[in-house]
Each structure stands twice: as structure tokens, then as C-alpha cells.
Amino acid sequence: MLSSRWVLAVYAGILLLIPRSHIQVTGLRMCPPKLFLTMPSIQKARCYSHQTPIPEALSTLSDYSLDRVAFQNGTTFWSMKGCGPSAVINFHDTNTFLVTCYDDNSILQVSLEGKTLARVNTTETIGEGFLGPNDFALDCFGGVYFTASGVWDVSAPAEGAVYYIPKPMVGAVLLSGSDVYKVVGGIHYANGIAVIKQGQVLLVSATLENAIHQFSIAKNKKNGRMMLLNGVKEKKIYSDLNAAAPQLDLVGGYMGPDGMREADGIVYVAQFGGGRVLKFKENGQLFGSINFEGPFRNNTNVWIQGTTLYTTQLTEVDLPTGNLYPGVVVKVDDTQLKSRENLLCVIV
């Protein structure tokens, strides 16, 4: 969901760095999912962009460029200078939120009143810090996974990782480094993340590999704490987007999967650099996409509510004219959202 405060773009064969405003959306997902059948259909639709207020389906969103988490009406719920919030999520039934601070390399716990309760920047179990905390995914056991991306550079080592925060013990409120466990490493820019198949499978976007990795989730007891800790095993490719969704790479190797959400047996994947949202069955088969016609090509996250899809899109600059298009949340209403194979969406 997040790379840096800059967007990479290509114009007339020249690689450019463009300042960006970043909006992200995260939230709860339901377990278990249901399965839907698919049917072929191609449709053109009109879609609507939102800046503030944001859609009612979302209670809060992270506004990276302003170092804050905002309410639906655009007012600030919480902020911290230098945080660079990439995602925010309601931490199950603890009456607190968790925020990924991408720039600060930390995870923050925030109260319902918008007060910072705790800050964690390392896992005490192995004494390792987080490099670019990015996105969250709740599991079905009371815990939460989050990605730490690594370096946003196609030539950099694959240092992306996934960490797990188990369900808090009874009476425990504040997050600490002893509550964070590393479960997966060696991912080339770990980005979006989702739990699917009734909590049995974890998906992780490897943006700079242009791939999505799949891991099985196993329940294990953690010695000394006698609680369930999810061990992640059996890494394999869920989908290689170079083969599944070939498309001209407009950003010099920086196109790849970003945020994703599962809803009713369909996995929706925002494609950074591709200007679309890809649709997969839970077995990894690509069966459709929502394509956006307009100035935005960097989709960063998705949210599904019924037959409505929301996707966040980064600020873009029209280089020939210099026109600036601020980042938006786009709403797509489609009664056949779960079954339609292809939809061309014109942003108005």
C-alpha cells in the first residue's frame, strides 16, 4: 500500500519522482466466507470519486501525506508527525485501533478517543525492528497480521516480512514488543495482506515480484502464555501476475499487487501501476478485473460492502499539462460485482 512519499512515473521514456498524497482504507473482514459462481459479462459503468467526506462504509482512513487518521467527515481522529500512516484497523474487541507508521517504522495503538496508548518498533522475541510497516489483516482467532515492506527498490534485497500479534490475554490492554512475532520473511516488498478460506490461508502481496504468495495458517500453542499463536508455513505462489494478468508495465518494474480484500469467496486485489482491481477465485484463478479510465493508475487498496466496491487511488500529475489530480476513494456500484468478469469504469 505504501512505498514512499514519491510516485514513480514514466514520461517520454524518462523515469520521474513525483510527490504524492496517500489515502488508505482498512477494516474488518468476516469469517467464514461464502462461495459465488462466476459468469462472463463485459460492462461499462460510471464511478464516483470521493475525497472528504469518505464513504459511509468506512469509519476511518489513513491519510499518509498529512500524518493522520481521518473520520468520515474529513476531520482528524488521530495524528503523529513523522508517522506516515499506511493502514488503520480496529483491533478485534479491545476497543482500540492499530496504526501502521510506515515512516516511523512502528505500530501504534490508539484509543477510541484518538489518544496514543502504545508504540512498538521492534519484536522483543528476536530483537528485530520493522522496516516500513504497511497493512493489516485480522485472523479468525483474535489476532492480527501485518506486513513490513522492506525497501521500495526493485534492485534492493527482499527484506519484506509478515508479523503476528496474538489475541490479547484477558485484562491485557497495551501492546508491547513481546506481543509481536515474526512469521514470514524474504518477501520483495510485502504489501497488501488478507486472510481467506475461513482463516486457513494467508495471502501476501509481493509488489516488486508482481506476485501474491500463499501461506497456510496452523494453530500452535505458545509456550508460557498458553494461547493460540498462528504459525505460517508452506510458502507458495498464489498467483504470478506476470502470467495471470499481463499488461504493459508503465512504471519500470514497479507495477504489482497492493492491498486486497476477500468477500464472499472472491479476492479483490488493487493493482499498483495497473489502474485496475483484479478479481480472483480463492483457488488463485484470475477471472476478471475492474478497469479504470482516467488519470489514476495507482490503485492501492480495496473495500467491499455488499455489491459496492471502494478503491483508493494515489495522487497523479498529468505531466504534459501539469494538472494535479489529488488522491481519491472511488466508489463502484455493481449488482453483479461478484460474478461479472470485466467492468470498465469511467471516473466522474
Image: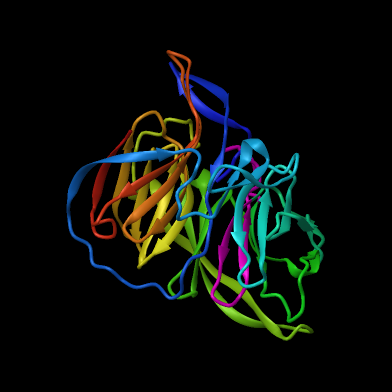
Residue 279 is left or right of residue 302, and the answer is left
Residue 283: in sight, yes or no? Answer: no
Residue drawn at x 33%, y 47% as measured from the top left: 332
Q: Position of residue 93 (x, y in %)?
A: 62, 73
Q: Is residue 142 magenta?
A: yes
Picture residue at 52% right of the left edge, 64% below the top: 28
User: Vertical placement of 253 versus 149: above or below?
Assistant: above
Q: Is residue 221 above or below residue 330?
A: below
* Residue 173 visible in the picture: yes
Q: Check if residue 84 falls in the magenta segment.
A: no
Is 40 left, or right, of 171 in this rendering? Answer: left
Residue at horizontal 69%, vertical 83%? 227
* Chain part drawn in magenta: 134-159
Q: Tell me residue 295's x, y (percent).
A: 39, 28
In this rendered view, identify the residue nearer to me: 11 or 198.
Answer: 198
Looking at the image, which residue sits at the far top? 321
Asked if 28 appears above or below 22 in the picture, the reply is below
Q: Residue 9's x, y, as percent? A: 49, 26
Q: Quadrant of the C terminus?
A: top left
